[in-house]
Image (cartoon, helix red, strand yellow):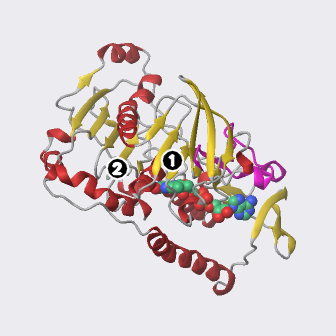
Amino acid sequence: MFVHVADVARTPAGSARLGVDLARPGVRWPDLRDRIFGRIDPIAAAGRRYRAEDNENVTLYEGTARFTGPRRLAVDTAQGTETITADRVVVAAGSRPALPDLPGLHRTDYLTSDTVMRLDHLPRRMIIMGTGFVSTELAHVFSALGTDITLIGRSDRLLRHEDTDVSQRFTDLAADRWDVRLNRTAQRVGHDGDRIRLHLTGPYGAETVEAEALLVAIGRIPNTDLLDAAAGGLELTERGTIKVDDTQATSAEGVWALGDVSSDHQLKHVANHEARVVQHNLLHPDQPITSDHRYVPHAVFSSPKIASVGLTEQDAARRGIPYVTAVQDYAGTAYGWAMEDTTGFAKLLADPDTGQLLGAHIIGPEAPPHPAPDPGHALRPRRPHHGPRPVLDPPRHARTHRERVAQTRRARRPMTDRGGHTPGTDPPR
Ligand SMILES: Cc1cc2nc3c(=O)[nH]c(=O)nc-3n(C[C@H](O)[C@H](O)[C@H](O)COP(=O)(O)OP(=O)(O)OC[C@H]3O[C@@H](n4cnc5c(N)ncnc54)[C@H](O)[C@@H]3O)c2cc1C
């Protein structure tokens, strides 16, 4: 909802080149903030009421839960600690903003994505630490509403998990709009009156940036530490997520996990999909189904917007998967002319032999579907479960990578995605 407001507020900035002069927006932050939370907060309250009062099958314990033994939990509530045991347990404890080990941070009123959207007033200047989707989306939101943004990153690009061409284009465009400082290491943070001062080192030596607000958006960590997963017999991955198999079962008998607490994707539609799998497997233990993580699309709702699914070029190269790419600029299409867009493009990766689509990445206006459907459903291949694989025509202006293809063909092996599935073998549902 904030991104839509930001897109509206940004409209005048891009309208003059079309021959339409729009006035600079006046932003009533308290009105827009209260309108958005006036819609969201009652939904949360209604969800709580349904569980607490209206559903006789649910007993709600409000507090932080932790395992104290196999399928045994202690919940610290306002009334004291309650112990719960169950035959079956589902863990969906999500993730929270990661915080850097930065001297002085806990003495400042730093913000995270949990708090920044409820600010009393728009800051004149905001420092954002982080280069991922949360930081770039919130940079777009607040800059469109009038806040000057300084974006700090440790690496040399923004959104570096995107396809390299996409991430580089985004980084170049962001530098035109925000004060982007990359290859920087934060050393300490302090106050100077109302201003926060962040001390950095980087390619130009020591430097200090200051602003009225500091937003920390360097990533999200799974809430497994709060849960004392080990006490419940739950194994963790190296990343600290709960280890699950493809039925979402954990290493502990009778315990399932789903969503950010056990997933590398950290996406809502992935959590929803896994919730449906867990629901089925609880109800039908003799006919378990598996999660399908082969085609996981995602979007970045910044400016420009990004939509992506499948392999990036660097993924394919790293894994020795033969591919060809095709790039189509928005500027080479009629709709791109209509928008006078000069920076957007779509990039496809495909198997050079079959034309099977391996990855698709779009950066530019309306890149993600608008309004976004549940992409996990929208992009599943529309075919019978055991029918032929979807095949694209070989791209017309395909850029071949013959050396890499020749090299990797020799060492060709079945392609597996991050979820460990082999494309073409549909999991049972
Ligand atoms: C700013 C932002 C923008 C995002 N935008 C998108 C987007 O556009 N599209 C998208 O797909 N995803 C987006 N995401 C990610 C998405 O919000 C998460 O992937 C999704 O919410 C994960 O759902 P979940 O149920 O696993 O966890 P959560 O929604 O985090 O829910 C976990 C719940 O468990 C509670 N909890 C945690 N620990 C305990 C405990 N020990 N005891 C009891 N309760 C506990 C938490 O308080 C929370 O209520 C965004 C995230 C952020 C932060």
Residue 135's disc is 1
The answer to whether residue 342 shows anywhere in this view is yes
Q: Position of residue 388 (x, y in %)?
A: 31, 43
The answer to whether residue 265 shows anywhere in this view is no
Element under label 2? loop
Element under label 1? helix
Q: Position of residue 56 (x, y in %)?
A: 68, 85
Identify residue type, mark 1: Ser
**Mark found first going from the N terminus, 1 or 2:** 1
- Tell me: residue 347, above or below residue 275: above
Identify residue type, mark 2: Pro
Instruction: Find the magenta span and give its range.
Output: 215-243
Mark 2 highlights which residue? 381
- Taking depth in this image into account, of 139 and 98 the one nearest to the observer is 139
Query: Residue 235 in magenta?
Result: yes
Q: Position of residue 307 (x, y in %)?
A: 36, 47
Outermost residue on the front side: it is: 193
Crowd class of label 1 (few under 14; some 14 to 19; many from 20; radius 10 Å): many
Left or right: 81 in relation to 408? right
Query: Residue 21 in magenta?
Result: no
- Taking depth in this image into account, of 327 and 9 the one nearest to the observer is 9
